[in-house]
């Protein structure tokens, strides 16, 4: 534990307030991080005092209280899949133990509270994205379904349960399916956009070729006022699926 963090925690627990910072101290701006504080020490008032301390550090503490059982030592758990946030909180508290343990219900609760759409969910037209459904089916058939696919499907169920409160459906879209499956395959998250582009490339090539062969150049396309006159939906032979 860093000495300055240790001093702040000692002051907080003994006197109910952290050490006053010198006038003019400026804390660096950080992204908005929501935090829940649960007191598992068995001592009264610790959660409230830590809540005040974390808010002074710039965190958005949305809930606090006592944990159902005592637990030593203190640990910071990331529930949104962003281990960097957990590391930042642990650093400000002087806590060495932190890890990522995403929870679908917590993810959805936080997004609903902040009026955010979880990444990988929602579609302008589909209430069930058939592309995502097919990718999940293939992952299951090929025994590739892992913790990331299970998490995104659990998140989808949690969103479905909150659909009336949200006001509209938020199905898993193809971006979310690709991200979850790539993560289970061990791909670095930075490659997600590249894999997505690979899946889009054949359609883009076909569209560009059709435009050059049949239409005038530099024309405007109304995204709503158009008709598809290409080949109808076709089923692949069983041996090619």
Image (cartoon, rainbow, N blue to C red):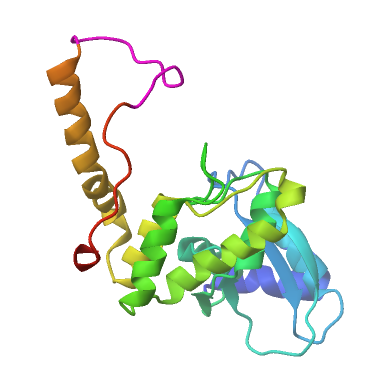
Q: What residue lies at 59% left-to-right and 74% top-to-bottom?
A: 76
Q: What residue lies at 17% left-to-right and 34% top-to-bottom?
A: 205
Vertical relation: 153 (above or below) 205 = below
Check if residue 224 falls in the magenta segment. yes
Pick the residue in front: 235 or 29: 235
Q: Quadrant of the C terminus?
A: bottom left
The location of residue 129, given as percent across then percent down, is: 47, 50
Q: Quadrant of residue 53?
A: bottom right
Which residues make up the magenta segment? Answer: 216-228
Q: Quadrant of residue 155?
A: bottom right
Report the predominant secondary structure element of the magenta stretch.
loop
The location of residue 62, given as percent across then percent down, is: 75, 57
Pick the residue in front: 124 or 120: 124
Check if residue 128 falls in the magenta segment. no
Count of number-bearing discs: 0
Pick the residue in front: 228 or 48: 228
Q: What residue lies at 60% left-to-right and 79% top-to-bottom?
A: 75
The location of residue 177, given as percent across then percent down, is: 41, 58
Evaluate whether residue 228 shows in this view. yes
Q: Image check: 212 left or right of 82?
A: left
Evaluate whether residue 59 shows in this view. no
Q: Image check: 63 left or right of 21?
A: right
The location of residue 29, given as percent across then percent down, is: 54, 44
């Amino acid at each position: 534990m860093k000495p300055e963090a240790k001093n702040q925690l000692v002051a907080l627990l003994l006197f109910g307030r952290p050490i006053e910072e010198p006038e003019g101290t400026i804390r660096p701006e950080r992204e908005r991080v929501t935090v829940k504080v649960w007191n598992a020490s068995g001592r009264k008032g610790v959660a409230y005092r830590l809540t005040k301390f974390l808010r002074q550090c710039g965190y958005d503490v949305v809930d606090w209280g006592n944990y159902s059982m005592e637990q030593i030592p203190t640990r910071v758990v990331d529930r949104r899949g962003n281990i960097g946030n957990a590391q930042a909180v642990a650093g400000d508290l002087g806590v060495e133990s932190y890890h990522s343990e995403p929870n679908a219900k917590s993810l959805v609760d936080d997004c609903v509270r902040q009026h955010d759409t979880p990444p990988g969910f929602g579609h302008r037209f589909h209430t069930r994205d058939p592309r995502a459904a097919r990718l999940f089916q293939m992952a299951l058939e090929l025994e590739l379904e892992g913790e990331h696919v299970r998490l995104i499907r659990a998140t989808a169920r949690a969103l479905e349960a909150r659909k009336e409160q949200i006001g509209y459906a938020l199905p898993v879209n193809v971006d979310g399916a690709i991200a979850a499956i790539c993560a289970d395959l061990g791909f670095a998250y930075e490659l997600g956009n590249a894999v997505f582009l690979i899946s889009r490339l054949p359609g883009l090539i076909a569209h560009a070729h059709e435009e050059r062969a049949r239409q005038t150049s530099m024309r405007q396309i109304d995204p709503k006022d158009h008709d598809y006159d290409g080949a109808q939906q076709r089923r692949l032979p069983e041996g090619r699926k």
